[in-house]
Image (cartoon, helix red, strand yellow):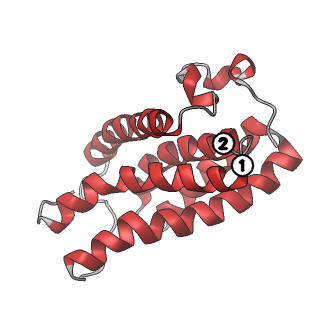
Amino acid sequence: MSDTPAEQRPRPLAFLPRALFEPRHPARYVALAWACTFFPSLLLSAIASHLVPNSGPEFPEVNSGLLLFLLVVFAPVLETLIMGAVLLVLERFFGFLPAVLLSSAGWGLAHSLEAPAWGLVIWWPFLIFSIVFLIWRKRSLGAAFALPMLVHALQNLGPALLMVSGVNV
């Protein structure tokens, strides 16, 4: 279990809100974590699109309901299960900050295999998802998995809705 309370949050992450390192008030926490993922992701996406136009991932041609399910339910659940298992091992051997950094870098690299510029955007939300997992692990393993899943689902909801409505993201 992590022993990184808000007062001892890693210096490289000190720019993030203090409340992100405090496992309290789940609904408020999810809103804060979502804001910490979504808005910086928009900026990173704009930068990546400018640097490497038309380099986003290709999604399969499936009906809208299935696409929404895959992006808003299936991916957050599956990826959080994988991320959480890996984070538990990484934190045990390397500590909080290295675990968070290795996890986010790994997810960025994994998503880069599909579309190189996508990894430039994806590492950031996974940095936050990783923090959420390890911080809520202090409360319970269930919360450690549930909260990042929810934040991840909210992260994917906006782009998923745009894609099913026909807007190119």
Res. 114 visible in picture: no
Q: Is residue 98 above or below residue 164?
A: above
Q: How many marks?
A: 2
- Name the residue that disc number 2 marks: 136
- What mark, if any, has residue 105 been given in the picture? none
Q: Are marks 1 and 2 in contact (CB under 8 Å)?
A: yes
* Cα separation between marks 1 and 2: 6 Å
Q: Position of residue 21 (x, y in %)?
A: 63, 29
Which quadrant is the N terminus positioned in?
top right
Q: Position of residue 126 (x, y in %)?
A: 54, 48
- Identify the element where label 1 is drawn: loop
- Name the residue that disc number 1 marks: 140
Image point 39% across, 35% down: which residue?
35
Image point 58% across, 60% down: which residue?
80
Q: Residue furthest top?
A: 7
- Identify the element where label 2 is drawn: helix
Image point 29% across, 69% down: which residue?
68
Res. 6 visible in picture: yes
Residue 90 placement, left or right of 149: right
> What is the three-letter code of the residue carrying label 1?
Ser
Q: Is residue 138 above or below residue 117?
A: above
> What is the three-letter code of the residue carrying label 2?
Trp
Front residue (pair 29, 49): 29
Q: Residue furthest bottom?
A: 62
